[in-house]
Every structure is written in C-alpha cells, then in structure tokens.
Amino acid sequence: MSSGLAASLAVIAALAVDAPCGTVDATPRSAEVPPLKSAYRGKFLIGTALDVPALEGRAPLDVQIATTHFDAFTCGNSMKPDFTQPEEGRFTFAQGDRMVEIAQRCGATPIGHTLVWHSQTPAWFFKGPDGLPPSRELALARMRSHIAAVVGHFRGRVKQWDVVNEAISDAPGEFLRPTPWLKAIGEEYIADAFRAAHAADPHALLIYNDYNIKRAYKRPKALRLLRSLLEQKAPIDAVGIQCHWRLDSPDLSEVEDSIQQFATLGLKVMVTELDIGVLPTRYQGADVGFRQLMTPEQRAALDPYPAGLPEPVALRQAERYRQAFEMFLRHRDVIGRVTLWGPHDGDSWLNNFPIWGRTDYPLLFDRQGCPKPAFFAVLQAGRAARRSARR
Ligand code: G3I
C-alpha cells in the first residue's frame, strides 16, 4: 500500500470515530457529522435517491440522511412511467410531489427520473387497439402526451429531467437498444422526446441517461447518439453517466476520458446513480433485465458479508470513493451533479441485483444511518478541494 494511500486511509479511519450509532435511543450519527453538501457547495450538487418507503413516510432515516447531507433528490422509482401513468390517462404524482416538497423544504434540487425507458413502462403504452404493437402515430402521441403531462405537472419545480434512459444497446454492432419505442417510432423518438420535454418546461435541464457509456465498448455509440441529437438541434443539455461501479471496475482513467469527450460536445455531465458495490459479481452493468443465478453452494462466495462489512473492505471502498470524487472534482467545471443511488446501504438496488437477496454495502451510510469510511473519504475530498480553491 502506498504511503499516500496509507495516510489517507488513516485520516479516514480516524474520522470514522467509533460512537454508539443507530441504536434505538441514539440520534443516528448521520445527524452528528458535517453535512456532505457543505463540502461540495459551489462545486457541484451532491444528490441521493429517495424511494417509495421514504416518500410514503415509512423511512424517516432515509429522509433524515437526505435532507442533512444532500442538495439534490431523485425519485428511485416514483417518477417512472409505471408510477406516473399506470393506466392510459390516469396519472399519479403523490410520491413525486412528496419528493419535491421534501426537497423544497431543505433547499435541495428536485431531479426527474425518467420519462422514456423500456423498463418500468406499463404494457398499455405498447399495445394498439387490436392488442398488437401501436402504430407509429399512436406511439408518438402516447410518448408526447406522457411527457407533456408529467413534465407539465412538475413544471418549474423539477429542475432536471432524465428524458430518455438507456436507449443505447450493449450488443456488439448494434447502435440502439431494440426497445418498443424504437420499433414503433424509429430512431427519431429520442430527439422527439427531448423536444416534448422542452416544450413542457423550457427551463428544465434535459439529460440523456445511461450506464456504461463511459466504458470504451459503449462510449462511441454514446458519442454518435449525442452528436446526432445536437445535429438535429434537439434541446439536450447534459449526458447522465449512471456509474454503478464495483471495487475494482471500471478503470477511472477510462471514465475521465469519457467525461472529457462528452464535454467537448458542449454538454454538461451528470453522475446520476453512483454506487460502489463490494460483492463479487461477473456482471458489470445495470441492465435490469439481467439476472445472475446463485445456488446455495455459491452463496458463501457470492454473498460473503451477510453479518456486516469487514473494515478492510470498507477502507478499500473508501479509497475507491476518494479517487472517484477527486476525479469528479478535477472536472467540476463540466460535472453539474453527483448523485448517490440511495441514502444508505439498506436502500440499495444492489441487494437484489444481479442476484436476489444478498447483503451489499455500496453507499456512504450503513443500514443504521452511520457514516461509513466512504462518507469520510468523500467529505475529505470535498474539503481538500475547497482548501485548494482558496489558495
Ligand atoms: O412497486 C412494486 C410493488 O407494488 C411490489 O409490491 C413490489 C414487489 O416486489 O415491486 C415494486 O416495484 C419494484 C420497484 O423497484 C419499486 O420498489 C420493482 O419490483 C423493482 O424491480 C424496482 O427496482 C428498481 C430498478 O430500477 C428496476 O427498474 C430499483 O428500485 C431502482 O433503484 C432501479 O433504478 C434503475 C434506474 O431507474 C435506471 N438505471 C439503473 C437503475 C438500477 O436498475
């Protein structure tokens, strides 16, 4: 271990002071440490995702962590098409409104996620009157009216939208994912979605969001799509890189190259769904359709920390977060936001992806709301950048 790494880990470990945490009668430690958002004020927004339990008042710890440490909130699910328009013409916005209310109460920026996606979109969107796929005109009308209704409802309150999510294919040689939207409308559905979102709220910042587009295999396709949108004068403002990472992948220099290449297009870059999983997995992505099976014999190997995160692993994760945030800070002129995909480890989708029922530890706070070494690493990185900015 390099002396620099040892020194930074020593600082992080020292900061992660032991204290009674998360016990029933103790204030969660998350309320007792410096707010993360203060260390990043003036650099970029630092956000988190609030999911259904928090927005239904069943997860006060999530709201406490979010309102104390973060200044941008994304709904993990509640603004997706299956939540906002479960049946044609019937809209439900209560959870999205709740997120906006919580955000406005603490001065955080509400982020909309997502308008057009192949997943979590009710089947009715893709059924014509005869039960067959809809005509191009019908699919376009449905997409446009969904966007107009949802963006219109949150107009002036939600400041950024993931307009189209994960439209690029992972398959070698295939540019766009063959989604029902692509099949019904054609490639132009993407630019059209951005135009519809802009018409519904001209002041909202509009984002194309995807996973692994900072990876060399997918980056060229992302650059091709973004250039095409810009050439069509689609009102796109930013590219969202989701950043669902592991302890040992991806290579941060590959990410940094991508951030720089996206920036040359004149687009902002948003880190939209950052988490760093610590469990072994072969799959490196976020295609929600992927599932890795696990036999009982494999469980010990694939779910190694059911009782808690060993400190050496926590420190490795902290170092990974430190390196990531130092890299983000180097590009804070381009990066407008870094959102962690959840307030604490118990909220993470990675507990059930790509294998159901594991215990992962991908975020900055543990299941009791205690700040982990990763929290202190991110806090340190922001503070150090602040100091260097003053010099
Ligand atoms: O709402 C239903 C509930 O009624 C039902 O009882 C329950 C039964 O399991 O399921 C609930 O829906 C779940 C939904 O989260 C809301 O909790 C779905 O099963 C579950 O699959 C869904 O998982 C979400 C995942 O997207 C699937 O699309 C995760 O919470 C969410 O964090 C994750 O986020 C995505 C981003 O939107 C896009 N980028 C990738 C990222 C990770 O997949």
Image (tube, rainbow, N blue to C red):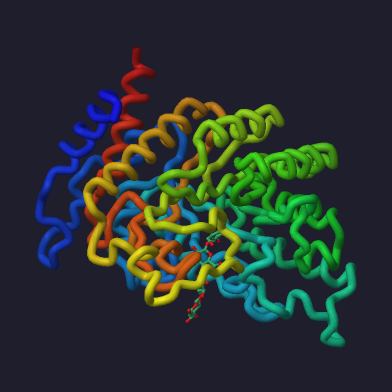
Q: Residue at x 30, y 37 (%)?
A: 377
As displayed, is residue 121 above or below residue 185? below
Q: Position of residue 150 (x, y in %)?
A: 64, 64
Left or right: 189, with 69 as reference point: right
Which of 152 and 57 lies nearest the eye of the viewer? Answer: 57
User: Residue lying furthest bottom in this view?
Assistant: 130
User: Residue lying furthest top in this view?
Assistant: 391
As displayed, is residue 174 above or below residue 57? above
Which of 167 and 112 lies nearest the eye of the viewer? Answer: 167
As displayed, is residue 272 above or below residue 233? below
Q: Position of residue 71 (x, y in %)?
A: 41, 45
Based on the displayed image, in which of its 4 quarters is residue 119 positioned?
bottom right
* Quarter placement of the C terminus: top left
Left or right: 105, with 202 as reference point: left
As displayed, is residue 139 above or below residue 314? below
Question: Can see residue 238?
Answer: no
Q: Residue at x 72, y 53 (%)?
A: 168
* Quarter placement of the N terminus: top left
Which of 98 and 241 lies nearest the eye of the viewer? Answer: 241
Q: Position of residue 284 (x, y in %)?
A: 54, 53
Question: Can see residue 310?
Answer: yes
Based on the displayed image, in which of its 4 quarters is residue 170 positioned?
bottom right
Based on the displayed image, in which of its 4 quarters is residue 324 positioned?
top left
Q: Residue at x 32, y 25 (%)?
A: 384
Q: Residue at x 56, y 58 (%)?
A: 286
Q: Position of residue 114 (x, y in %)?
A: 61, 59
